Amino acid sequence: MMSNDAAVSIGDGVYWIGGDDRTATIFEGAFPIPEGVSYNSYLISSKDTTCLLDTVDASIASKFWKNLRTTMGDRKLDYLVINHMEPDHGACITQVLEAWPDVTVVGNSKTFTMLENFYHVVPKNRMEVKEGDTLTIGDHVLKFYFAVMVHWPEVMFTYDETTRMLFCADAFGTFKAMSGALYADEMDFDRDYLEEARRYYSNIVGKYGSKVQAVLGKLKDVPIEMLCPLHGPIWRRDLGYIIGKYDLWSRYEPEDKGVMIAYTSVYGNTGVVAEKLAHLLKERGVSNVVVHSMTTEHTSYAVSDAFRFSNIVFAATTYNNNLHPTMSATLEDMENMAVQNRRYSVIGNGSWAPQADRLIEERVSKMKDMTKVGETLVIKSSLAPEQIPELEKLADDIAASMR
Ligand SMILES: Cc1cc2nc3c(=O)[nH]c(=O)nc-3n(C[C@H](O)[C@H](O)[C@H](O)COP(=O)(O)O)c2cc1C
Ligand SMILES: [Fe+2]
Ligand SMILES: [Fe+2]
C-alpha cells in the first residue's frame, strides 16, 4: 500500500506523504517511543492548484522530499497550510519556502509569530485566517477551525468541505510506527495501537481536556468522513470509536473499571505488597489490574493508565523524609496532566519515620475530584504478617468501590 517514492492517494485529489521514524527513542525529549512514531503530511492537488498541509519531522525529511518531488513533478506549490507549528511537523517549512518562494503560507496570527521565532523567516506571501474562514483550492473548499491548545495555542484544524476530510493536527494521533498500514481499518487498532494512542493523548494533550471538549463541540454537526491526523493512521471507518475515546479522555471519565497500582521500592518490600494486593484483587474478581514499578518504568505509562482506569493505588517508600523521587515524578506528571475524578488508595512504607503516605495524600489533594477508598496502609520496612488482614480489607474496599 505505502510507496517509498510517491505520495499515496487517499481521496479525490488528496495525497498522503509521510512515514515512520524508528530511529528516535525519545519523543519531545521526554517520552520513550520503543515502537517508533509516524508523521503525516498531506497534499491537495486540484485543477492545477496545489496545497500542502503541514510538513514532517526532520528525521523523515529526505523521504518526504522524495515523495513530494515525485508527486509535484514540475508544478509549483501554491499554498502551504500550517495547522501546527511544533517542529515535529514544521521541520521542512523553511525548505518549502526555499523551493517555492512564491508559495502563500496560510496560518493564523500565532502561527506567523511562531514561524518567525523558530525559523526567523517571514514568508513573502502570507494569508492570515480567522476562525471559520474558507479557502478554495481548485475543487476543494477548505474551512479553518481553531483548536487552541489541542496541543499548542496556534493549532487549527482544516476541514475540506469537498472530501469531508478533517486535517486535525495532533488530535487522534498516536505513538508507534505504522508498519505498512495507512488506515486504522488496516490494523487491529484496539489490540495493537490503543495503548500507544492513549499514552500519546494523556501525556501530550491530557492537560487540555476542556480545549478538546471545545473543539469536539464545534465539530459536532460537521459531516466528517475522514480524520487525517499528523501522527498515526487515517480514520475512514468507525470514526465514532476514536472520537468516543477522545470524548471520554477529555472529560476525565475512566475508560475501564480497573485498578492501576503504581509503586516505588528501594529494596523490594513495597513491591511485594503491590503484587500481593494485585493478587488479592484478582481473587475478588477484578479482571483489570495493572502494576507499574515507577523505579523502572517511565512515568508516561502510569499517566496513561491513570486516564484508563477507575482506581489508582499509590504505594511508595519514604526517602530522606520525602517521597522516593520516582513516585514524586509520577505524582507530578499526573498532576500536570490534570488526572482527576478517580478513586485512589494509599500505601506508605518507611523504616524509621514513614512519611510517604502523608506526602502522597498531600500531592493527591492537588488533583480534582479524587475519592479515597479504604484505609491508608502504613508498613514499617516490610509487611508484617499481622497486617495481612488490613491488606485484605483494602482489597475488599477497592473491589467493592468498583461494583
Ligand atoms: C536513601 C534512603 C533514604 C531513606 N529515608 C527514609 C526516611 O526518611 N524515613 C523512613 O522511614 N525510611 C527511609 N528510608 C527507608 C525506606 O523507606 C525503605 O526503603 C523502606 O522502609 C523499605 O521498603 P522497600 O523495600 O520497598 O524499599 C530510606 C531509604 C533510603 C535508601
Ligand atoms: Fe504537537
Ligand atoms: Fe505532533
Image (tube, grey):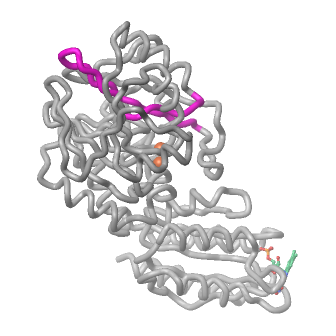
**Quadrant of the frame with the C terminus:** bottom left
Seen at 54% across and 70% down, the residue is 336
Seen at 44% across and 58% down, the residue is 205
| Residue 51: quarter of image | top left
Residue 344 or residue 173, whichever sits in front = 173
Q: Is residue 76 left or right of residue 101?
A: left
Residue 338 or residue 274, whichever sits in front = 338
Magenta range: 35-59
Q: Is residue 339 magenta?
A: no
Look at the picture and state if 60 lies above or below 225.
above
Seen at 73% across and 86% down, the residue is 379
Quick check: can you spot residue 142? yes
Look at the picture and state if 211 lies above or below 229.
below
Quick check: can you spot residue 271? no
Q: Is residue 234 left or right of residue 115?
A: left
- Residue 221 x %, y %: 11, 53
Dominant SS type (magenta): strand
- Residue 49 x %, y %: 24, 20
Q: Is residue 83 left or right of residue 118?
A: left
- Residue 120 x %, y %: 56, 41
Residue 365 or residue 5, whichever sits in front = 5
Q: Is residue 46 magenta?
A: yes
Look at the picture and state if 85 lies above or below 327.
above
